[in-house]
């Protein structure tokens, strides 16, 4: 009975936070801040190739549950960045959720500050960019989007990471959808390419890798522990402990 009591209490408090946020902190997407966070180097200041992986809390009340992720690239001596991401509402207006365009690499995601997960430059970045160009054309869920448990924006970035080992990074535990391996795929390399992952349609699974540590997915919620950079990983909260760097 005590466990049920605490579960009800936690859900009630979380629901209260969400209701409060919707009522008093609502941000209109049409006027929300979409400016640069000043993280990415300006093209005129960095002639070398650049690949950066970002994540930011999702729009409005959804921010308590998940992040949105994307990848920005700049080729050697290029004067602009290309941003790769999947956006759900584009599916209904354009017929595809896949969005590839020249854009500001470190835009705030509708007022949410982006977090830089990976910054790759130079020759390795050049190699990664060529692979990314090829991988995105093979993404199988560009005409499909499900916020939970996937495929969604995090599924797309996870799909890229698994096929571009130069990036050797994993998405945060709040990236719901990253564990969606496919409808008929149940085992693959981990996101960082330093381990392995098993799972079923993003609802349950386990991953073990040098970068990821140990992660367990239960109904799309991610719990884990990073041993090499001591930290615990929790749904809603994210990473607690030593930073990724």
Image (cartoon, rainbow, N blue to C red):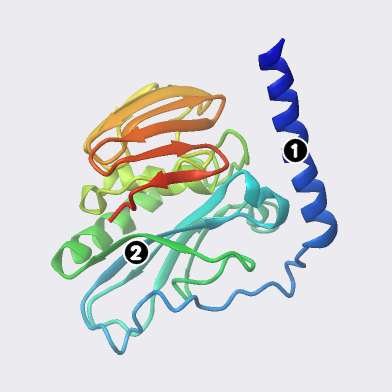
**Neighbourhood count class around disc 2 (C-alpha, 10 Å): few under 14, some 14–19, many 20 upward:** many
Q: Residue furthest top?
A: 1
In the image, which is nearer the foreground, mark 1 or mark 2?
Answer: 1
Return the x and y of residue 82 as percentages of the image width and height.
40, 70
Residue drawn 14% across the image and 67% down it:
123
Give above or below for 62 relative to 50: above
Give above or below for 219 relative to 68: above
Q: Quadrant of the C terminus?
A: bottom left
| Residue with the mark numbered 1 | 13
- From this viewpoint, is residue 117 visible? yes
Residue drawn 48% across the image and 70% down it:
101
| Residue with the mark numbered 2 | 52
Return the x and y of residue 232 as percentages of the image width and height.
40, 37
Give above or below for 39 relative to 157: below
**Neighbourhood count class around disc 1 (C-alpha, 10 Å): few under 14, some 14–19, many 20 upward:** few
Q: Quadrant of the N terminus?
A: top right
178 relative to 147 in the view: left or right: left
74 relative to 49 in the view: left or right: right
Return the x and y of residue 200 as percentages of the image width and height.
47, 21
Residue drawn 55% across the image and 50% down it:
67
């Amino acid at each position: 009975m005590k466990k049920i009591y605490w579960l009800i209490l936690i859900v009630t408090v979380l629901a209260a936070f969400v209701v409060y946020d919707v009522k008093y902190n609502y941000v209109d997407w049409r006027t929300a801040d979409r400016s640069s966070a000043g993280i990415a180097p300006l093209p005129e200041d960095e002639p070398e190739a650049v690949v950066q992986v970002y994540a930011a809390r999702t729009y409005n009340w959804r921010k308590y549950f998940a992040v949105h992720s994307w990848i920005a690239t700049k080729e050697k001596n290029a004067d602009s960045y290309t941003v790769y991401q999947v956006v759900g509402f584009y599916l209904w207006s354009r017929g595809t959720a896949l969005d590839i365009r020249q854009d500001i690499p470190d835009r705030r995601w509708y007022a949410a500050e982006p977090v830089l997960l990976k910054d790759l430059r130079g020759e390795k970045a050049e190699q990664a960019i060529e692979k990314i160009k090829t991988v995105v054309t093979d993404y199988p869920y560009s005409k499909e989007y499900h916020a939970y448990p996937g495929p969604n924006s995090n599924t797309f970035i996870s799909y890229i990471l698994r096929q571009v080992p130069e990036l050797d990074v994993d998405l945060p535990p709040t990236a719901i959808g990253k564990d969606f391996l496919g409808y008929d795929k149940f085992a693959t390399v981990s996101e960082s390419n330093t381990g392995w992952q098993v799972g079923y349609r993003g609802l349950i699974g386990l991953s073990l890798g040098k970068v990821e540590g140990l992660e367990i997915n239960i109904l799309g919620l991610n719990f884990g522990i990073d041993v090499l950079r001591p930290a615990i990983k929790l749904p809603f909260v994210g990473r607690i402990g030593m930073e990724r760097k």
